[in-house]
Amino acid sequence: MEAKSEDVYYLTIGLLQNDKSNNTAHARQKYVSVAEEEAVNYKLQRSLISHATVGNTSFFKTAFNGLNALSGVGILSTPYALASGGWLSLLFLFIIALVTVYTALLIQKCMDADPSIRTYPDIGERAFGKKGRLLVSVFMNVELYLLATCFLILEGDNLNNLLPNMGFRFDGFRIEGKQGFVLIVALIILPTILLDNVSILSYISATGVVASFVILGSIFWTAAFEGVGFHHKGELLNYKGIPTAISLYAFSYCAHPVFPTLYTSMGNKKNFSKVMSLCFLLCTITYALIAVCGYLMFGSTLESQITLNLPINKASSKIAIYTTLVNPIAKYALILTPVIHTIENRFQSYCKGRSYTVFIRTSLLISTVAVALTLPFFGLLMSLIGAFLSITASILLPCLCYLKISGAYQRFGLEVIIIGCVLTFGIAVLVIGTYTSLVEIIGQL
């Protein structure tokens, strides 16, 4: 990290006082002049950094980007989360929404403390040095990697639902429908992941907000006008399913690594808190509506993805399923791009040719396919991501980084009490949720 201008000055004075030789006044003045020059250079560099981080994105565009970041595949799993924990588990959706919007504002405070911060790993480095940057990067990249894997599982499940009992033969081997669809989708995705510039895909993935509302509207239409109805009462509380429900709710709010970029891009950064409040409010309303709607429609029979429960012979159901299928294919390359860049930068001395880049990207895709085929449990894998990775990246790290950067841990007050409660809640969910998810995954193998 760069030293502050005051640190430069006092460091120089200290060296002068400890110099055993009899320095002249001219020598002292020379050192002080150097310190002043360093201070001027530091201020100039800070000014340039601050100027570089000035964005011009409007309030509504930032809100749209925030909604797109939050509105992911979590919308498909919130009904299953509600079915797992019962009606009272819906309270945890609102609690997690409040906690995560609070930690999003802590990220803003961390960035306000240092204008040079532009990314989530920068916050980790500002707080805990290179180890902090490494920790944040690892959690970010592992979360994105597993999310890309979930995309493949989602595609395989829904295609198998549309085209059941379909198998594939290759060189004498028979591949079952779900596994075959995962491989086919991977081949479709392969050209997109080999692109050096995936800006074209960003326009397609930006339809995520619209897609969420299309899915919600299609499911409601299926229930209200296609004969499914809202006939299931459900149960008030299922203690055994609470850890799964909370983990899936947490997964739905795992966009915090994106927030520093949104903050940096804003023209008027003072409105960032309002943007976050709006995004979390709209997403929470959407998640709650589809969870309640799905639970009333299918009750405890809900699958890990609500689209798997929809009658495939209805037009509205097909719209919901097809919308669900298009988005992951478009978003896969964008989701995995940070992971690709991290690996390529790490081995850039070996990746001088195009062949090395193709090898790395193809290997990543193959590895996600292998994980998707080995652990084809969409709900359980999402639950594990939510409990371990999302809780860490979206709740624990923002709190810890803010305490260190602001120095708030040195003074006891209401803010420290609130952050302490948030950390306690996050750690409890991490431990219980991760253990429950791992036990269920191992039991399914």
Image (cartoon, grey):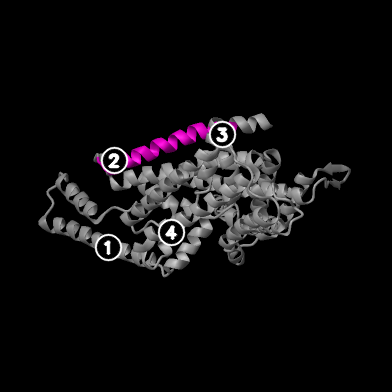
Residue farthest right in this picture? 172
- Which quadrant of the figure has residue 195? bottom right
Instruction: Confirm or deny contact between disc 3 and disc 4 (CB under 8 A).
Output: no
Mark found first going from the N terminus, 3 or 1: 1
Q: Which residues are magenta?
A: 413-438
The alpha-carbon separation of the residues under discs 4 and 1 comes to 36 Å
Residue at x-position 45% and y-position 55%: 281
Which numbered disc, 2 or 4, marks the residue closer to the eye? Answer: 4
Of residues 222 and 266, which is closer to you in this image? Answer: 222
Residue at x-position 45% and y-position 33%: 428
Whether residue 363 can be seen here: no
Give SS at disc 1.
helix
Instruction: Confirm or deny contact between disc 4 and disc 1 (CB under 8 A).
Output: no
Residue at x-position 55% and y-position 33%: 238
The alpha-carbon separation of the residues under discs 3 and 1 comes to 55 Å
Mark found first going from the N terminus, 4 or 1: 1
96 to the left or right of 213: left
- Which quadrant of the figure has residue 178? top right
Query: Which dot marks residue 278?
Result: 4
Of residues 357 and 138, which is closer to you in this image? Answer: 138
The alpha-carbon separation of the residues under discs 3 and 2 comes to 35 Å
- Going by the numbered disc 4, the residue's amino acid type is Leu
- Going by the numbered disc 3, the residue's amino acid type is Gly
- Going by the numbered disc 2, the residue's amino acid type is Tyr
